[in-house]
Image (cartoon, rainbow, N blue to C red):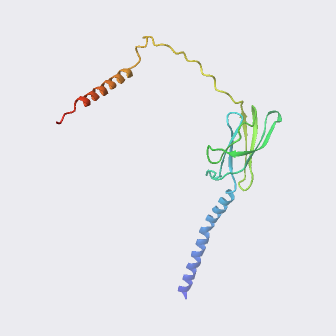
Amino acid sequence: MTGIRKALAAVFVGLALTVFAAAPAQAAQVARAAQADKLKLVVAGDGAEGVTIQATYPDGRRLDQVVRLVLTATGPDGQKVGPVQLEPQPEGQGFYSSGAVLTAGTWKVTVNSPAPLSGKATATVQARAAQTPPAPEPVAVNKPADGGAGAGWWPYAAAGLVLVALAMGVAMLFGRRRTD
């Protein structure tokens, strides 16, 4: 009888260890499933009058699907923009851009993502008027001081190649042997 009791006790201990070992793994799966329906949104200005958003999963993985992001903003003197639905951009997975929707000034921007992948982020963005690059200064074309004598070596090299080709052609033409 003691052998059967020992065998049953070993089976129960093995089952208990299996259940306790699986419990943390199940808890981790439940936590991952709870985070799977959330987004991490990073909001920043684009250097002009727009906003850029990078959307990722909370664990840092890149977003592998298109989500709906909605932007609202409050600016100087109580100006309001939005709601504006954002479209994904070709710059990368999870990258969104608003285009020029703000005017110059400091804006409080909020981006929301509704279910099934919910997320919300708020940031202060400094919008600046778009700037054009300065016109290039005209470049003066000056004649070389040596009167063009420094034109380079390439005309001489080209003339040499022509002479070598001509000499080879003449040699091939007159160098044949007659067989009579």
Q: Quadrant of the C terminus?
A: top left
Residue 123 percent across, percent down from the top left? 72, 41
Above or below, 117 against 47 in this view is below
Q: Which of these two is toward me, 65 or 3?
A: 65
Q: Quadrant of residue 134?
A: top right
| Left or right of 28 on screen, residue 149 | left
Q: Which of these two is toward me, 104 or 174?
A: 174
Seen at 55% across and 18% down, the residue is 139
| Left or right of 74 on screen, residue 166 | left
Seen at 59% across and 78% down, the residue is 12
Toward the bottom, the furthest residue is: 1
Q: Quadrant of residue 127?
A: top right
| Left or right of 13 on screen, residue 119 | right
Seen at 45% across and 11% down, the residue is 145
Q: Which of these two is toward me, 66 or 20?
A: 66
Q: Quadrant of residue 166?
A: top left
Residue 157 percent across, percent down from the top left? 35, 23
Toward the right, the furthest residue is: 78
Residue 34 percent across, percent down from the top left? 69, 59
